[in-house]
């Protein structure tokens, strides 16, 4: 390891101690960012971890909506995102204005929003969900019609668990990184690794979901990998950053990406140098408008309550 790299890691560790700070990292972060984090997980796990921590400062290595969720759940803590440009393109696909129009058109429907949404949209929702609990949350809602956004692929997955009428808002919201995973890649990967089971994220297109042995959130994939027999092989259909965690935590099994181009550039924006600066300056801080904070928190807390 280079001297400069080692010194930077030592400085980050020192700053964390001095400031009583914690680093939370999403499963899609760069390998070196995952390696210096206190906790690595999916959005649901990170939301729970953010609530449990006794640290004063949370350095959040994920995209905007995840850091916002941590800030909403922790009004007394300072949440800092190392690069403010880490903006999820999917979350940008649903505006509060469009959601209000859909709510007016379907006044009896309840609104379930994927955590990948802006805070002002969360404030208009009845409940939030993640890819780990979308089916469970949709089933638990009272209404027979659900407005669900912004990912229409996750809506397709949620629909499989219920006879309720799910209306995607917007009609075709999607994750550009998961849309890189196409059938041609899957066929080639299966030819190269015929024994491998197929494990994909519900942000993948319906054809990929329908071809899979398992559909799971990123942490669900780690769990399935852990529970598999030694020597088992898996084709992984999600952002490639998860491969680092799988290889580190489940070394006795084999994991191959279905598509090596399924990369989320926004997730890769946080670097060790930016984390060091963020810790030093405690900036840029994630600040949520007070009028949005309480309403958004209600919808997130409902999810945490329904998804034990
Ligand atoms: S992987 Fe997709 S949904 Fe996740 S942050 Fe990147 S663009 Fe957004």
Image (spheres, rainbow, N blue to C red):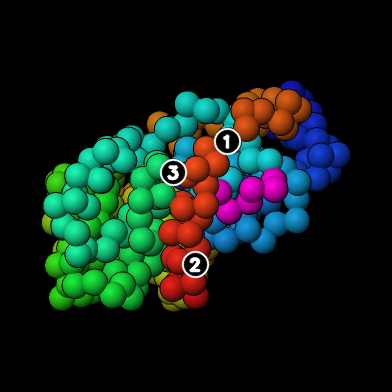
* Mark 1 surroundings: few (<14), some (14-19) or many (≥20) residues within 10 A: some
Name the quadrant of the N terminus.
top right
- Residue 216 can be seen, yes or no: no
Q: Any magenta on residue 73? A: yes
Q: Nearer the viewer, mark 1 or mark 2?
A: 1
- Residue 220 can be seen, yes or no: yes
For disc 1, does the CB lie below 8 Å from ligand 1?
A: no
Q: Residue furthest right?
A: 18
Q: Is residue 254 left or right of residue 104?
A: right
How far from the left and from the top, in percent, is residue 85?
47, 26
Which dot marks residue 304? Answer: 2
Q: Any magenta on residue 188? A: no
Residue linked to disc 1: 287
User: Which region is colored magenta?
Assistant: 72-77
Mark 3 vs mark 1: which is more N-terminal?
A: 3
Residue linked to disc 3: 119
Mark 2 vs mark 3: which is more N-terminal?
A: 3
Res. 121 image quadrant? top left
């Amino acid at each position: 390891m280079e001297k400069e790299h080692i010194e930077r890691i030592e400085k980050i560790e020192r700053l964390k101690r001095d400031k009583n700070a914690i680093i939370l990292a999403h499963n899609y972060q760069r390998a070196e960012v995952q390696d210096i984090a206190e906790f690595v997980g999916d959005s649901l796990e990170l939301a729970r971890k953010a609530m449990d921590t006794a640290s004063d400062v949370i350095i959040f290595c994920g995209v905007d909506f995840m850091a916002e969720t941590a800030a909403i759940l922790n009004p007394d803590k300072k949440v800092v995102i190392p690069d403010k440009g880490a903006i999820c393109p999917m979350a940008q696909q649903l505006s509060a204005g469009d959601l209000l129009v859909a709510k007016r058109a379907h006044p009896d429907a309840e609104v379930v929003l994927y955590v990948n949404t802006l805070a002002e949209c969360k404030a208009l929702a009845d409940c939030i969900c993640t890819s780990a609990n979308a089916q469970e949350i949709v089933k638990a809602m009272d209404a027979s019609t659900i407005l669900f956004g912004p990912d229409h692929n996750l809506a397709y997955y949620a629909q499989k668990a219920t006879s309720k009428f799910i209306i995607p808002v917007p009609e075709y919201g999607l994750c550009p990184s998961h849309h890189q995973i196409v059938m041609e890649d899957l066929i080639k990967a299966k030819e190269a690794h015929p024994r491998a089971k197929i494990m994909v994220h519900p942000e993948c297109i319906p054809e990929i979901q329908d071809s899979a042995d398992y559909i799971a959130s990123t942490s669900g994939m780690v769990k399935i990998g852990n529970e598999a027999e030694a020597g088992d092989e898996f084709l992984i259909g999600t952002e490639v950053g998860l491969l680092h965690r799988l290889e580190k935590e489940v070394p006795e099994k084999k994991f191959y990406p279905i598509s090596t181009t399924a990369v989320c550039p926004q997730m890769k924006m946080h670097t060790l140098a930016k984390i060091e600066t963020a810790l030093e300056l405690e900036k840029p801080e994630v600040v949520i408008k007070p009028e949005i904070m309480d309403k958004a928190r209600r919808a997130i807390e409902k999810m945490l309550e329904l998804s034990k």
